[in-house]
Amino acid sequence: MTALQRKPHHQVAHLTDDDVEAIAAELDRLRQGVLDDRGARDAAYIRRVIAVQRSLELGGRVVLLAAGRRRPAWVLGTACLALAKILDNMEIGHNVLHGQWDWMRDPKIHSTTWDWDHASPPEQWKRSHNQEHHVHTNILGKDNDLGYGILRVDEDQQWRPRHLAQPLWNLVNACFFEYGIALYDLGFGEALRSGEGLSPELRERAGATLAQARRQVVKDFLIHPLLAGPGWRSTLTADLTANLVRNVWSHSVIMCGHFPEGVETFEQESLSPDESRGEWYLRQMLGSANISGPPLLHLLAGNLSHQIEHHLFPDLPSNRYQEIAPAVRRLLERHGLRYHSAPLPRQVASAWHKVLRLALPNDWLATTTPRNLPGQLRSLWRYRDRPTWAAG
């Protein structure tokens, strides 16, 4: 059975092998039911979302070109662009690139042909996200999505003095999230940390990333402002604002999926080399968190507000997650497992709380008093490989 962070009392301790097999069988039946039922209404859904996204982008551009120097028109045009970019990245791009709509056999809406308004090339994103993150979900040292290689988001990740700055890095990452993801998908940070330099393969991938990012930058910050003529400043600020809104929104939603307090992480050593289907299901459910809210929130979140369901069934059409969520919740609760779900503000606050808390060594706050604070601050820079903090 999967162990959770060496915890003496963990969520799966009471489950027998038969329980795990029963969970897997029920989830397999739930998945197969959706596969057997998907059809015209699902295809109509994704085509409708794509049409809305393109209409929002076109409408925003027209408003900015026609009257972008007037504040009400600028606000309307910018809002349309921001919504278009959010839909393109979240409900459309993320899910199309997962292969959720490949069954339609539509070459225009297929994971092998789809491109998106994002700095990360689709093939590189699919490699790091689909083939690495979704396979090694929340395994320390295997899933680099745990902090994207720059944040400490679990007590079992070794603390370094550089982590003191991680709240600032997280804020910067939120503002430039698509570029942070592009560097992460490229594996640039891992190459720097290894000291091995840029291999020929990495150089090739870097060239593809630069080309993809350059297309987005030229489109948003050169071509469209030039087309606006005298109103180029309004168009430029609208594009900058829309990209910022999209980045902060995407970062917030994705943080809520795996970073909030109470989401489980796993050690490679504690996992069976022959992890069963049921154990894999358990890892996805306990390593994910949902966002509760109205249908519009789910749409704008790319249905990653149903992160638990998405990690269980990453290839199912995203519009079906809300339908199957009650059954997944009943299954977890019936087996005494937590279905981690909360409103967006609470999940965002929880994720940021973890980033702030783990910027310091384990137990540092608990052992720090006004009297010993100066010594504790000095000791931060002498701290090395201790698993827990001991007051100096």
Image: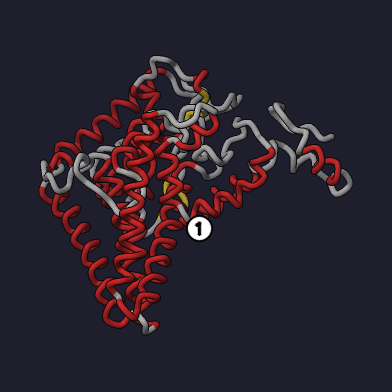
- Residue at (36, 64) in percent of width and height: 221
Q: Quadrant of residue 24?
A: top left
Whole-percent x, y for residue 240 in the image? 41, 65
Tell me if 68 is positioned left or right of 42 in this view.
right
Q: Quadrant of residue 132?
A: top left
- Residue at (33, 23) in percent of width and height: 277
Whole-percent x, y for residue 212 in the image? 32, 48
Q: Nearer the viewer, residue 171 or 390?
A: 171
Q: Quadrant of residue 38?
A: top left
Tell me if 157 is positioned left or right of 58 in this view.
right
- Residue at (17, 40) in percent of width and height: 102
Q: Nearer the viewer, residue 50 or 305?
A: 50
Q: Amino acid at mark 1?
A: Pro
Please state, as top left, top right, bottom left or bottom right, where the C terminus lies in the image.
top right
Q: Which residue is mark 1?
A: 345
Q: Is residue 150 visible?
A: yes
Q: Is residue 285 above or below residue 15?
A: below
Q: Is residue 347 visible?
A: no
